Image: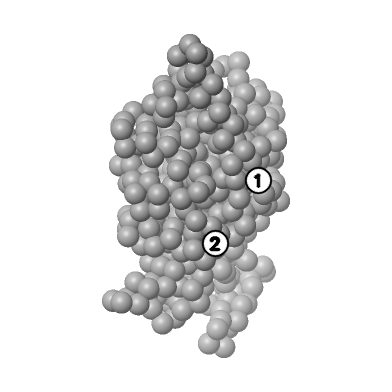
């Protein structure tokens, strides 16, 4: 048989094996990890990305969250980059043995990774999965691209804001535009810290331990809300120069919550001011322009003929976009700062968009080339360059297939 025909047959068989096999997807977020079978519509489990490592005591994910008052909680990832690889490896092992209950040697894995992450971070993850877990194949994909696929679209501008980072990715006909990607390291974690600061300044209640900061995060998710426009936020009463009673009387939308120790906490207007960090990072001393400028800058970097389609297909993804009135505020800021006379924006906000970063099996076509253990061991540098992005060319895919075989 002709060697070329034999090589083509091998490539086809490998693509069929990758597509038919039950693949497991792991959506790695700074705050949570979403894992499950790729053929399922939603993740099988959503576990907190945290650990407790106290001498010989080790608790992971949900167990660590249950014991948050006894030990110090730590997160292996910060702003989308793994900082503690040992704890992250323990979490992956917990994912295989206790969450998925499957052997790691039998199934290919699809990992999500934030765009523009350091290559060494991707290399360390690939080395762990191939050497420690003996995974047969591995692929990295950006969450915004997968979120767009999950919504049933191939063209759009995805705004993904989670716990660690905020990124905006324009995608046309299923291919991301790498030159137009915008990334801002301001997200839900920064809102938590600013919310804690406002509560301390407004009500005099201090939250400083890791378990107390988790309580602040829960209060933020339940009670924080965005005003429709920036002018409405500026109309809120100032925190300075007023007594606590005067502030409560001026703020008609104040909410009182009961803390675990039985005390009552008045959130006041802190629940409106905290999410403003996303639109005005200068409140916490950062020089980013804001989440709405991420969208405008990304679309402006795209080709002129594509901008109309991108303006009318803005998709929200990530837990931080679940803040109440986020869509209305984003739409108002886009219209105000776009510089167009009659701007037409359309924002799509799926109900379960905090889970949209995990791919379905329908998205795993043969064009998505997995990197196998053999390719990683033989040509690690070339393989990592190929698998780092979803927008690789057909020539790169063919190169990887040749490396595999």
Q: What SS does tag 1 mark?
A: loop
Q: Position of residue 16 (x, y in %)?
A: 59, 31
Q: What SS does tag 2 mark?
A: loop
Q: Residue furthest front?
A: 1
Mark 2 vs 1: CB contact within 8 A: no
Q: Please tell me which residue is depicted at 62% across the width and 77% down the height of the picture.
A: 256
The answer to whether residue 386 is seen in the rendering is no
- Mark 1, Cα crowd under 10 Å, few <14 / some 14-19 / many 20+, is some
Camera-near label (2 vs 1) is: 2
Number of marks in picture: 2
Nearest to the observer: residue 151 or residue 328: 151
Mark found first going from the N terminus, 2 or 1 = 1
Q: Residue furthest bottom?
A: 262
Q: Position of residue 366 (x, y in %)?
A: 57, 29
Q: Is residue 108 left or right of residue 56?
A: right
Cα distance, mark 2 to mark 1?
A: 17 Å
Q: Residue furthest top?
A: 2
Nearest to the observer: residue 33 or residue 373: 373
Q: Is residue 118 left or right of residue 148?
A: left
Q: Position of residue 338 (x, y in %)?
A: 58, 30
Nearest to the observer: residue 250 or residue 128: 128
* Relative to 263, residue 83 above or below: above
Q: Which mark is residue 101?
A: 2
Q: Position of residue 101 (x, y in %)?
A: 54, 61
The answer to whether residue 50 is seen in the rendering is yes
Residue ID for mark 1:
39
Q: Please tell me which residue is depicted at 59% across the width and 63% down the height of the picture.
A: 221
State which quarter of the image contains the C terminus. top left
Q: Please tell me which residue is depicted at 49% across the width and 18% down the height of the picture.
A: 6
């Amino acid at each position: 048989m002709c060697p070329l025909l034999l090589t083509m047959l091998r490539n086809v068989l490998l693509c069929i094996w990758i597509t038919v096999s039950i693949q497991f997807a792991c959506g790695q977020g700074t705050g949570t990890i979403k894992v499950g079978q790729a053929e399922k519509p939603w993740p099988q489990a959503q576990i907190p990305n945290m650990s407790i490592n106290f001498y010989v005591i080790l608790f992971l994910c949900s167990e660590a969250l249950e014991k948050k008052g006894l030990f110090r909680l730590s997160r292996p990832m910060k702003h989308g980059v793994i900082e503690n690889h040992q704890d992250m490896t323990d979490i992956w092992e917990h994912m295989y043995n206790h969450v998925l209950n499957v052997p790691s040697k039998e199934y290919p894995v699809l990992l999500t990774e934030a765009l523009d992450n350091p290559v060494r971070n991707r290399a360390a993850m690939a080395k762990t999965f191939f050497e420690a877990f003996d995974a047969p194949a591995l692929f990295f994909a950006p969450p915004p691209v997968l979120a767009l696929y999950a919504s049933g679209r191939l063209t759009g501008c995805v705004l993904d804001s989670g716990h660690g980072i905020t990124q905006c990715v324009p995608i046309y006909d299923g291919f991301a535009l790498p030159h137009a990607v915008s990334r801002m390291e301001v997200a839900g974690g920064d809102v938590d810290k600013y919310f804690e600061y406002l509560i301390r300044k407004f009500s005099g209640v201090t939250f400083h331990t890791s378990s107390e900061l988790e309580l602040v995060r829960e209060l933020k998710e339940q009670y924080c809300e965005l005003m429709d426009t920036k002018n409405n936020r500026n109309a809120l009463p100032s925190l300075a120069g007023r007594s606590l009673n005067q502030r409560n009387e001026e703020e008609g939308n104040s909410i009182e919550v009961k803390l675990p120790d039985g005390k009552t906490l008045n959130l006041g207007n802190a629940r409106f001011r905290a999410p403003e960090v996303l639109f005005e990072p200068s409140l916490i001393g950062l020089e980013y322009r804001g989440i709405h400028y991420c969208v405008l800058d990304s679309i402006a970097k795209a080709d002129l003929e594509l901008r109309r389609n991108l303006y009318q297909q803005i998709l929200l993804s990530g837990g931080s976009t679940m803040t109440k009135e986020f869509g209305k505020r984003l739409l108002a800021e886009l219209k105000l700062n776009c510089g167009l006379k009659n701007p037409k924006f359309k924002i799509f906000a799926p109900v379960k968009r905090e889970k949209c970063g995990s791919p379905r099996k329908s998205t795993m076509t043969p064009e998505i080339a997995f990197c196998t253990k053999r390719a990683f061991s033989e040509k690690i540098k070339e393989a990592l360059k190929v698998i780092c992005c979803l927008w690789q060319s057909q020539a790169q895919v063919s190169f990887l297939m040749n490396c595999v075989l």
